[in-house]
Amino acid sequence: MNQEELKSSYPRFSPKGTRSGTTLPQVSPNNASLMNGRPASRKPQARGVKRDIEKLWEVINQQQAVIERQHQEIERIQRMVEPMSDVLKRYTDQAERRMYKKMDKQSSDQIKTNTRIDNALAALRRAKANSDEKARIFTDQVMLISTH
């Protein structure tokens, strides 16, 4: 059963203690014992039920008033917090931009350092290859002289 069906299946009571669109049956001395097969002694209890319903409506109205006050307080607090939220958002956005800038700078510095290291390594490899070539030539010359 959906919520609308549930609402329509139960009688709705107004704060006056009567169901919407209907009235409570009136009990007279003539039909008191015949009404729904109940004895006439139920009449005082019917008044008690009506009082209970009226009390429940009072409680419901009080709770509704509390809910409305709480809702107003929540809205007031949200209005108070909204400017702080905007300030904090701007601050975090600025901090985020600063961090991205710092990371970009560190990244570009690291790229430059890596390039210098790569260039130095390439120069060392060339120097090693050159010295290896000179050592090979020297070894060849020593071998050539020793064989003559």
Image (tube, rainbow, N blue to C red):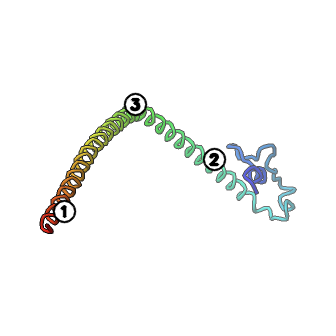
Q: Seen in the image, is 125 located left or right of residue 57?
A: left
Circle 3 sits in a helix, a strand or a loop, which is it? helix
* N-terminal-most mark, 3 or 1: 3
Q: Along the polypeptide, which appears first: circle 2 or circle 3?
A: 2
Dot 3: within a 10 Å radius of its alpha carbon, few (fewer than 14), some, or many (20 or more) residues?
Answer: few
Give the amino acid at mark 1.
Asp
Please state which of residues 93 and 107 is positioned toward the viewer in this rendering: 107
- Mark sitting on residue 57: 2
Image quarter hosting the C terminus = bottom left
The CA distance from mark 3 to mark 1 is 84 Å
Q: Nearer the viewer, residue 126 or 69?
A: 126
Residue type, label 2: Trp
Q: Amino acid at mark 3?
A: Pro
The residue lying toward the viewer, choosing from 2 and 109, is 109
Tell me whether the residue at label 2 lies in contact with that at label 3, contact meaning CB atoms closer than 8 angstroms. no
Tag in front: 1 or 2:
1
Q: Which mark is residue 83?
A: 3
Quadrant for residue 128, please give it: bottom left
Q: Extreme bottom residue here?
A: 147
Secondary structure under tag 2 reads helix
User: Residue 28, percent across and down?
Assistant: 83, 53
- Residue drawn at x 50%, y 36% as measured from the top left: 72
Tell me, yes or no, whether the two marked residues, 1 and 2, touch with CB atoms within 8 Å: no
Q: Is residue 73 above or below residue 128?
A: above
Residue at the image position 53 percent from the left and 43 percent from the top: 67
Q: Which residue is mark 1?
A: 140
Cα separation, mark 2 vs mark 3, equals: 40 Å
Residue 122 point in image, percent of width and height: 26, 49
Q: Is residue 12 or residue 71 the one in the foreground? A: 71
